[in-house]
């Protein structure tokens, strides 16, 4: 992959930027005397600028999760339905994208509103935060929209066309741009929202896009994996052999891992020509994805007939952690038998470097499993239940010893611990 350096000499600004280049954090001026602006590049610095924390969709937070007795630090309600987890911008703001396209920015310390931008898009897909803090998402009208805190209007609205993709969450690029997905295409946007290149895939992307070196990985509804280097043709590099639950995560060894068909954890080793192996089969129930990954481990929820567990498995599929986190209600059939388990709406867990796990159980209870397996759960339900789900849209790490729970009904709740990891505080 080509390295592009940013240099300025005698007032000469950045002349070009490679479509997929790695650059350190830096600022450079675009040449446009009518509208001078600063282009910020480098990997987004927020604690969670993308769905599942980062471009690997790892679900792994750099900062420790809360420890000790959990507490609700604050709760803010804004009354607009939300279908996706919050994101965190480079300045630490918590960004919530509502189902109709309004973007609300909250202060992580007290939950006070820092800004709100109304887009009026009607309906939107998943969002991402770029290097300069722009929140980017696709609308139901086929436009890519970029929103910045402090601006009353969108920073850009770019016509892409096609149908919005509700599952293929976008990627932020190190050059300040982003990759967005429609039901058929991938499009690379530059930092100003301009389309640099696009491609049509053989299968519709049906899971969050994954960054792997200079490649963008897209998983289709049948589990097939296509890799695309912008400027080239996409290539099929493997298959999961079934339908994914949530997202695939890229491990430290370069393999993709996901829950497939609810009953198995599957690894696809891209370095070995897409070799597929089953890491584990659900012993008596279902696995609930997506998994969170850290070196040598995958962590996720497991649903059994009477309990829900947080489980962690090593590379050989052996359980290294099993912690009960909630009761599971079973349904009886008319003949008196027990109905088969059906995966309820659920959200992926978060994991930190110690192995602590933040979870939202399918019944709506939120808590943290410590590395030793001990569990603390917030006593009350944080989100309002609906007829469809427990009301939790997702979990997002916000910094040391804190994470935010996004509620579908339109609220955000910051969860912290009684032991604030001494010397840290939420949002710092």
Image (tube, rainbow, N blue to C red):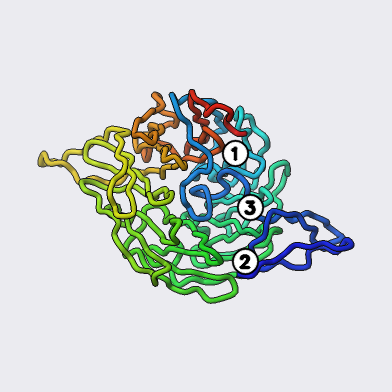
Quick check: 425 left or right of 134?
A: left
What residue is shown with label 1?
94
Around disc 2, counting alpha carbons within 10 Å, would you say few (fewer than 14), some (14 to 19), or many (20 or more)?
many
Query: Image quadrant for the C terminus?
Result: top right
At 57% across and 33% down in the image, what residue appears?
78
Give residue 20's position: percent from left, percent from top.
62, 66
Does 119 appear above or below 359? Answer: below
Q: Which residue position holds label 2? A: 20
The picture places residue 318, in percent across and down from the top left corner, at 27, 49
Q: Please give the name of the residue rendered at 57% of the width and 43% of the height, measured from the top-left corner.
A: 47
Can residue 102 be seen here? Answer: no
Q: Are marks 2 and 3 in contact (CB under 8 Å)?
A: no
User: Residue 378 in the image: x percent, y percent?
Assistant: 41, 26
**Residue 382 in picture, x, y percent from top left:** 44, 29
Q: Is residue 350 above or below residue 206?
A: above
Picture quadrant where residue 180 is located: bottom right
Label 2 to label 3, Cα distance in Å?
14 Å
Q: CA distance from mark 1 to mark 3?
A: 14 Å
User: Which residue carries the number 3 mark?
Assistant: 130
Q: Name the element at disc 1.
A: strand
């Amino acid at each position: 992959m080509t390295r592009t350096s940013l240099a300025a000499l005698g007032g000469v600004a950045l002349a070009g930027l490679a479509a997929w280049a790695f650059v350190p954090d830096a600022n450079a001026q675009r040449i446009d005397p009518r509208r001078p602006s600063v282009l910020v590049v480098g990997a987004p610095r927020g604690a969670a600028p993308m769905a599942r924390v980062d471009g690997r969709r790892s679900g792994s937070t750099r900062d420790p999760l809360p420890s000790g007795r959990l507490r609700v630090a604050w709760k803010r309600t804004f009354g607009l339905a939300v279908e996706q987890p919050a994101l965190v911008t480079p300045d630490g703001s918590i960004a919530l994208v509502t189902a109709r396209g309004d973007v609300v920015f909250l202060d992580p310390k007290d939950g006070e509103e820092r800004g709100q931008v109304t887009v009026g898009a009607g309906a939107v897909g998943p969002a991402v935060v770029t290097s300069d803090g722009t929140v980017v998402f696709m609308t139901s009208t086929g436009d890519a929209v970029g929103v910045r805190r402090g601006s009353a209007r969108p920073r850009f609205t770019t016509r892409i066309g096609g149908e919005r993709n509700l599952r293929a969450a976008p990627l932020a690029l190190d050059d300040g741009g982003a990759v967005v997905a429609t039901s058929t295409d991938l499009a690379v946007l530059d930092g100003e929202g301009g389309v640099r290149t696009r491609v049509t895939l053989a299968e519709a992307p049906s899971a969050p896009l994954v960054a792997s070196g200079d490649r963008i990985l897209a998983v289709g509804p049948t589990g097939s994996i296509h890799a695309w280097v912008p400027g080239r043709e996409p290539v099929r590099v493997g298959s999961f052999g079934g339908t994914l639950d949530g997202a695939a995560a890229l491990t430290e060894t370069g393999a993709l891992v996901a829950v497939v068909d609810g009953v198995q954890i599957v690894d696809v080793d891209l370095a070995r020509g897409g070799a597929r192996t089953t890491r584990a089969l659900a012993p008596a129930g279902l696995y609930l994805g997506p998994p969170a990954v850290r070196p040598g481990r995958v962590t996720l929820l497991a649903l059994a007939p009477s309990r829900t567990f947080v489980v962690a498995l090593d590379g050989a599929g052996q359980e290294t952690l099993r912690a009960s986190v909630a009761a599971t209600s079973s349904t009886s059939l008319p003949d008196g038998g027990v109905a088969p388990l059906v995966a309820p709406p659920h959200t992926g867990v978060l994991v930190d470097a110690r192995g602590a796990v933040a979870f939202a159980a399918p019944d709506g209870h939120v808590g943290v499993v410590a590395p030793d397996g001990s569990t603390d759960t917030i006593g009350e339900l944080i989100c309002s239940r609906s007829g469809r789900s427990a009301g939790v849209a997702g979990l997002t790490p916000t910094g040391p010893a804190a994470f935010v729970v996004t509620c579908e009904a339109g609220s955000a709740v910051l969860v912290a611990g009684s032991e604030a990891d001494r010397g840290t505080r939420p949002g710092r």
